[in-house]
Image (cartoon, rainbow, N blue to C red):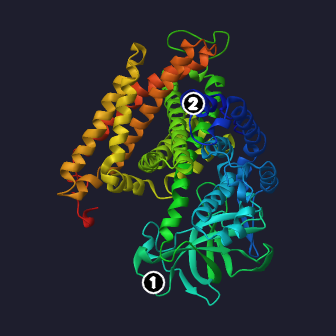
Amino acid sequence: MPSYTAPTKDIQFLLHDVLKVSEQSVPGYDEMDRDFTSAVVEEAGKIASDVLAPLNAVGDTEGCTFENGVVRTPKGFKDAFEQMKEGGWTALDCDPEYGGQGLPYLMMTAVNEPFVSANMAFNMYQGLTHGAYSAIHAHASDELKAKFLPKMVTCEWTGTMNLTEPHCGTDLGLMRTKAEPQADGSFKITGQKIFISAGDHDMSENVIHLVLAKIVGGPEGIKGVSLFIVPKIMVDDNGDLGERNAVSVGKIEEKMGIHGNATCVMNYDGAVGYLVGEEHKGMRAMFTMMNEARLGVGLQGYAQAEAAYQNALIYAKDRLQGRDVTGAKNPDGPADPLIVHPDIRRNLMEQKSFVEGARALTYWGANLIDKHSREHDEAAHGLVSLLTPVIKGFLTDKGFDMAVQAQQVYGGHGYIEEWGMSQFARDARIAMIYEGANGIQALDLVGRKLAQDGGKHVMAFFEMVKAECKAHEDERMKPFTDALKNASKQLQAAGMYFMQNGMKNPNNALSGSYDFMHMMGHVCLGLMWTRMAAAAYSELDAGNTDTDFLNAKIKTGEFYMARSLPACSMHLARIETGADTVMGLTADQF
């Protein structure tokens, strides 16, 4: 069975040596000193290793069951969920007014990572609830917030997001679920939703569904979509549970992975719903939930890669196979361990350098969200909006790739279920699809985010990269700054190509959007590695005695800059070919 250990030292390095959280002006960050964050992350790591990780394979093999209208989670999930609730882990960054602890979102992100690495399917139950909480907190009336949020904060009641229908996914303007106004101000919701993660289960007293629907008589298309709270069980004015609402599970989907999470078809047959926010403004409210969710899905991408990497590393050190071409490293044994071989080292270094860079990018994104929500920093909001499709799309694409590479280290054993490596790849695969498939993320980046607010956010990003390079004149930093400058220039050249060629033929831009997303992802990780290397050198110069850790950080970054960042050249070359080869065939010629 695979094991997992939370990378607490790496997390602390990011929080305190790279982001320097306790020195920032963001309200609440002054309380995040090393001792505090260490205690919280260490405890989260223990729960991840001791409670959640042992249930990961259980969830994969048992899955969820659906009998007589009741959804049951795998053995052990319910007890583990009780431990999460009792420990207050579901409420870390929630509003104290509703029972939360009020910690920054960055702290929640740092704690969430070990939980996702240890058991992604399990953590989705509280993850979806947190997203639903955020949407209700931001857009619902005070009455609805008081009625539903306190028990969602504690996960006594869990939450969901209901968007997709059998005939429409991304194009939500095609939805058919309808909402009929009632005399008491509520609505009757009728329709079917599919792919509803954590749609129903036996771990909470109630499930609070957030449902997109069209109010009868409203505008056509996406402009007519509204958002509703639809509880599984009705809640009276005192907060007590009453009768079952007219919402039911049609079936549980059989999936490639995340078997421990109940992905449901939900049927609404005149169910009572309550409007969240304004009529016909449902997408505005839902995007509050989706943007947070997309950062969380990016985290899922690298968190699964982290868990897979840890196990591949253990296997590479233990498994004896062949001899080192430069001389035996295990002369008393029949063979040397796998890790002596250059191609195994390449494989492991690609995994390690990606995961550590991805973690830094995600934590920076969470830091920007805190700056906006706690300091009303609009520049931070613009920057994280630009980065969100990159964090979601690039990190999940590469996270899946790295999970597969970790599986490859095992050779044939990686393909055998009892070794557990296939689960990481299968679970990671969904992250590329849900919360907006990665092709949509690329279109969002190129079609909307680059031009947002006159392009000032992407220009600010380029200036930030330029300033980072200028800030490190130290000769030791040249492997980082020279590579980052070159990659940034290539990214700017790709953007210029879109400007010059996209107006006359939009397909010239859209056919290169996926390459641009990956290109920007590489530049973002190059920026993160430059920051991490500078922080590591600073710590070494200051006399930090953990030299092995700091030197490993620098060498890992040098690998990324030398071996991964040059992918930008390939992506630029592909972008500059335009749309002709992409669109060259007619539909009938495929």
Residue closest to the eye, 79 or 245: 245
Q: Position of residue 537 (x, y in %)?
A: 51, 17
Q: Looking at the image, can residue 5 be seen?
A: no
Left or right position of 94 against 179: right
Residue 311 found in image quarter: top right
Quadrant occupied by the N terminus: top right
Which type of secondary structure does the marked residue at label 2 adopt? loop
Residue at (53, 65) in percent of width and height: 286
User: Please, what is the three-letter code of the amino acid marked with disc 2?
Assistant: Lys
Left or right position of 172 against 352: left
Q: Nearer the viewer, mark 1 or mark 2?
A: 2
Going from N to C along the chain, the mark reached first, 1 or 2, is: 2
Residue 303 found in image quarter: top right
Task: Identify the residue at the far bottom of this view.
Answer: 183
Q: Is residue 473 above or below residue 504?
A: above
> Residue 218 got which mark?
1
Q: Position of residue 99 (x, y in %)?
A: 75, 56
Q: Position of residue 267 (x, y in %)?
A: 62, 78
Residue at (71, 67) in percent of width and height: 146
Which type of secondary structure does the marked residue at label 1 adopt? loop
| Number of residues whose C-alpha sits closer than 10 Å to that of mark 1, classed few (under 14), some (14–19) or many (20 or more) | some
Residue closest to the eye, 532 or 239: 239
> Residue 20 got which mark?
2
Q: How many marks?
A: 2
Left or right position of 386 against 427: left
Marks 2 and 1: in contact by CB < 8 Å? no
Quadrant occupied by the C terminus: bottom left
Q: Position of residue 464 (x, y in %)?
A: 38, 35
User: Please, what is the three-letter code of the amino acid marked with disc 1?
Assistant: Gly
Residue 195 found in image quarter: bottom right
